[in-house]
Image (tube, grey):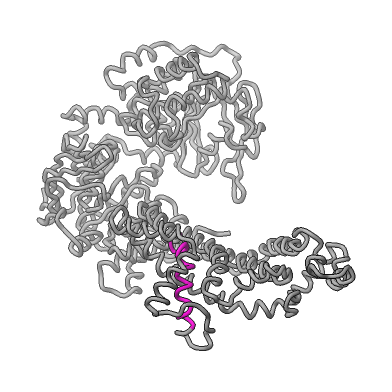
Amino acid sequence: MSEELLRIDDLHVAFSTRRGMVEAVRGVTLTVGKGEMLGLVGESGSGKSVTGFATTRLLDAAGRVTGGKILFRGQDVTKLRGDDLRQLQGAAMSMIFQNPRAALNPIRAIGLQIADAILTHKRISKDAARAEALDLLRAVQIRDPEARMNAYPHELSGGMCQRVMIAIAISCNPALLIADEPTTGLDVTTQKVVMDLLADIAAARGMATILITHDLGLAARYCRRIAVMERGRIVEEASPRTLFSAPQHAYTKRLVAASPTATSRIEDLVTEEERERYSAVVGKPRREPEHGTPPLLQVRQLAKRFDQGSAAVADFSMTMAGGESVGLVGESGSGKSTTSRMICRLIDPSEGDIVFDGQSIGHVAARDFHRSPLRKDIQMVFQDPNESLNPRYTAFDCIAHPLMRLDGMRAGDALRQRVEECAERVGLPLDLLPRFPHQLSGGQKARVGIARAIACRPRLLVLDEPTAALDVSVQAVVLQLLDRLRRENDIALLFVSHDLNVVRMLCDRTIVLRNGGIVEQGESRALFDNPKTDYTRKLVEAIPHIETGEVLAAAL
Amino acid sequence: MLSYILRRIVATLPVMAIVALFVFSLLYIAPGDPAVVIAGDQASPEDVERIRQSLGLDRPFLIQFGSWVWRILHGDLGTSIFTNLPVSAMIGQRLGPTLSLMIVTLLLTIVVAVPLGVVAAWKAGSLIDRVIMGFAVFGFSLPVFVVGYMLAYIFALELEWLPVQGYTPLTQGFWPWLENLILPAVALGCVYIALVARITRAAMLEVLQQDYIRTAKAKGLGQGGILFIHALKNASVPIVTVIGIGIALLIGGAVVTESVFAIPGLGRLTIDAILRRDYPVIQGIVLLFSFVYVLVNLMIDVTYTLVDPRIRY
C-alpha cells in the first residue's frame, strides 16, 4: 500500500438522544493511503456516514467522539480547535454529500458558492477567486460555464448540482475527499457520468477518496479496497473480487446475495428461511388466462401537457393482462411517473383513454375518481415510505383507512381481522400495528405501504420506485413479497423504476420511456440482453454490475 | 422587475377602491343621521337641513361617493367640521412626529431584534438563548402604556437623562429631535422587538438545520460567515414579513404612545377627531393609514424577489 494519509483508530461516536446515549460507531479502525479510493459500504444505520462526518468534523451538535483517534497526516483531527480546524475543513479535507440540490445554498449563485470556498482559504482578490471558480466549473465539465456562474441551484439538474459540489470540494486541492452517497438519487446514466468524473479528478490530482455508499456494485466498480460496516463496526475489508467471490463474514454474505446482478433472479436474493415458502409459490405453474379474456388495462394514446411547454407524455399506449408485471423505466424527466399517476387516476390526462376491465376511466376527473367503484381495484405504492405515511396514523390506521373508505367497513372485529390478515400477508408482525411510522424501520414502513395498497384486494398495483429508499437486503425481501403477491393473488404490477436490475427480475415485460415517448418495449430479459436502441443500451451499460474482474483488469 | 412592480401597483388599485368605499361608508354605518350627528345637539331642524344640503347628503349614495373620490384624487380630503381647516393641512402638520416615531422605532427594532434572534438561534438551548427569549416573553406581555410610564419615570423623572415628553422637529437639530423620541420608540418597540426576535430565532433555527449550512461548514467558513452570509439571508423571508405586519401594530401603538408622551402626531389627531365625531378627519386618517399599509405590503413583496431568486411572479 502507498504512503498512509488517514488512520482511524478504534473510533467511537455516540449521539445523545432522549433515550440516552446511543453508540453509532463502535470501534472503527481503517486506513486510507495517499491517492487511494476506499469504498465504505453498509446499510442505513451502519455508521458509515457518521464515520465520514467524524473525520471531517461535521457531526451534529448531538454527536460526540467518545473514544479513539482520527490521525490525518499524523495529526489527531478530533483534537483540533478554531483556526486549525478551519484550515483543515475544505482545504486539506473536503466532503460531498447526498442530495446535492439541498447541499447548495438555494439563494446564492453557484459561482459565488465556489468562490466562497476559495476565498476562505486563499488570500486572493474576489476577481481572481471568480476566475478560479470558472476554471473549476470547466474542470467538472459543466457546459457553458460563463453563463452557469450566475445560475442558482434550482436552475440546474441534480447531476449538475453534484458537479458544482465536486467543484467546491476540490477547489483547494484537498488531499482527502469524503463522498457520502454522492450519486444516490441520480439517474443511472448521470450516476455513471458523475462517478467517472469524480474518479478521473481524484486520479489526476492524486486525491485520496473515501466513497461512502450502500451500493456494493458502485463501490466494486470504482474502488480497489472495500470496507463493509455493520452496526458501527467494520466486519470485513477486502478487494472487491475477494468480497464477491469469497465473502467471509455472515453479513457480507447476505449483502452480496441481496445485491442484484445482471443474472440474478428474485429467488437468489431471498434469505434461506424465506426461500422455501417462496419456492412453493414459484414452483406452481401460472394459471394461463382463458382465451379471449379482455386485457385488464388498456391505455390508448395517452398524453399529458402541463401548463406550458412541450408534452410531458405523448402518444403512450400499452396493455396489461391480469397478474402480469410490466416495468416502466427511463431517466428522470422521461415521463414515467406522470404516466403512472395518470393510470392511477391521480392526475388527468390531456388526451387519450384508459380502459380498465372494459370500462373507460380516462375521462373520470382525477378528483372524483375516489368515488368510482374501480378506485379499490387500482392502488398505488409510493416511493418514499417515510413521506407517504401519515405520521399521526398508526400502522393499523394506515391499513384500516382504505378499508373503511372504499370497502365501507366499520371499526370492529371484522376490520381488525382484515387488517391483521393484510399485515400477515406482507410479513408485518402484528405487534407492530399500534406503532406510528417513526417507530418503524424503513423496511417495516414499506410493508405498511404495501399492506395499505393491497388491503382492498386491488387487481392492479402501480408502484412508483417502491424500493428506491430501501437498503438492498430490505429491497430483496420487498421484491420477493411483491412477486409472491402477484403470483398468489393475481395482482397485476406496473412497476416504475430507474433501477434496471430490479425491473429485469420482477417484470415480464419492460417499456423504456424517453422524453415522454416509448423508445422500446418487449419481454424483459430479451430487451436487456439485446437492447435495440442506443438509449436502452446506454441505460443498461450504466448499471453498476458486480462483475468486477474486467473492470479491475482494465484499471490495472 | 420593473414590470412586476408596475403590475403590483395596478393590482393595489382595487384594494384601495374597496378601502375608500369602506371609509366613505363610515359616515353611514355610524348610528343616526349623519347631518344630525354633524350639526350637534343644539341644532335646529333648519341648521340640520342646511348642513345636509351643503354636504350633499341629500343626493344618492353613489353620486356622493363618486364626487368624494373625485375630490380625493385631486388632493382634497375635505374640511374638518370642528376646525374648518382643510383635512389635508391638518394631517400634514401632524405627519412629521408620527413618521419620525415610526421610523426610529422601526430602525431600533431591526438593529436590536435581528441580532438578538440570530444569537439566540446560534446558541439555541443555552443560557443566552433562554435569557433572550425570556426578555421576549416579558416585552410581549407588557402593554405599551405601562412600559411608557415606567421608562418616563426612571429615565426622565429620576435619572433626568431624557425629556419626559414633547416633540422637537428635525429642523431644530438632530439630537433634540432624537432625544425626545428615544423613550417613546423604546416603549412602542418593546412588543415589536419581542416579536421580531422570536421570528428571527425560529427562522434561523430552521435554516441552520439545512444541508447547505453543513456544506458551508465543510468549506471551512467561519461562524460569522455561516450565520450572516449563508443563514440570515435565507431566513429573511419570514423576518421581512413580520416586520411588515408589525407596521400595522406600530400604527395602532403610535396612538397610545403619542398620548403617553404628549407627541402632537396623527395618533393624537385620530383620538381627538373620534371624540369630536369629526368625520372628514377620521376618513382622511384611515385612508392614509390604509394607503401606507398597502404600500408597505408592496415593498415586502418586492423585497422577497430581491432576497430569493426562486420567487418570481
- Residue A87 pos. (x, y %): 21, 63
- Residue A104 pos. (x, y %): 38, 56
Residue B12 vs residue A166, the one in the foreground: B12
Name the magenta segment's main secondary structure: helix
User: Is residue B34 rendered to the left or right of residue A473?
Assistant: right
Q: Quadrant of residue B300?
A: bottom right
* Residue drawn at x 65%, y 23% as measured from the top left: A359
Q: Quadrant of residue A351?
A: top right
Q: Is residue B186 magenta?
A: yes
- Residue B182 pos. (x, y %): 45, 75
Res. A167 in view:
no
- Residue A490 pos. (x, y %): 49, 17
Residue B189 vs residue A149, the one in the foreground: B189
- The count of marks equals 0
User: Is residue A541 rendered to the left or right of residue A288?
Assistant: left
Q: Does residue A252 lie above or below B48 as drawn?
A: above
Which residue extends farthest front? B42
In the image, the segment drawn in magenta is: B177-195
Which residue extends farthest bottom? B172
User: Is residue A71 rendered to the left or right of residue A365?
Assistant: left
Placement of the C terminus of chain A among the 4 image quadrants: top left
Q: Is residue A60 magenta?
A: no
Residue A297 vs residue B135, the one in the foreground: B135
Q: Does residue A330 lie above or below A168 as drawn?
A: above
Residue A277 vs residue B14, the one in the foreground: B14
* Residue drawn at x 47%, y 67% as measured from the top left: B189
* Residue drawn at x 49%, y 44% as measured from the top left: A333
Q: Does residue A185 lie above or below A301 as drawn?
A: below
Res. A130 in view:
yes
